[in-house]
Image (tube, rainbow, N blue to C red):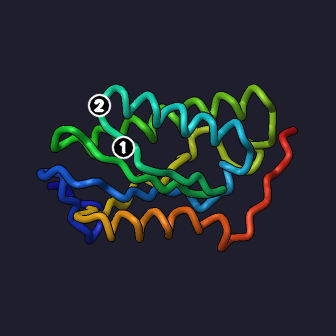
Amino acid sequence: MSCMGDRRIIDDELYAHFITFSCDRRRRLLDLDQPKRIVLGVLAQEIKRIDAKCVGFVVMPDHVHAIVWFARTGCLSTFMHGWKRYSSRLIREWYGKQSLNYFQEFKSGDRFWLPKYFAFEIENSSELKEKLHYMHLNPVRKDLEPIPEP
């Protein structure tokens, strides 16, 4: 069991986890397609590395939701550390190569992701359906439209 803020995360039983994590200062760093692709590519790598399954995901302009199940207990923290660390590094590199004003407003040493993440244990199929529904309606509620690539 680990602790994120005031909430205890249970990772000593085989629950599916509804995970949410955000860009630092709620910056819209995931508006463009390539940063989204990087987040999902690293998700796929970490799922394979840790032997997990992803039930669903949504990448919003400033945060990410996913439902992940692990074949073993005690994997959530390692999984999240890898996902956030590798995705932030690759996205920063991409922004740097594209010269897309990423570093004009923020310094190169600024955090990409908030250090915390939130994980809620899903114990049954009705909770799973509820979280999937919430997650997939998130872009609809925000009335998001695709942003054209530069």
Q: Residue at x 42, y 66 (%)?
A: 131
Residue 133 x %, y %: 49, 67
Q: Secondary structure at mark 1?
A: helix
Q: Nearer the viewer, residue 30 or 97?
A: 30
Q: Which mark is residue 50?
A: 2
Residue under label 1 = 80
Q: Residue at x 80, y 42 (%)?
A: 101
Q: Is the residue 99 above or below the residue 59 in the image?
A: above
**Sequence order check: which comes first, mark 1 or mark 2?**
2
| The C terminus - image quarter | top right
Residue type, label 1: Met
Tell me how far mark 1 sits from mark 2, CA to CA: 11 Å
Q: Are marks 1 and 2 in contact (CB under 8 Å)?
A: no
Q: Nearer the viewer, residue 122 or 95?
A: 122
Q: Secondary structure at mark 2?
A: helix
Task: Left or right? Give the position of 56 relative to 120.
Answer: right
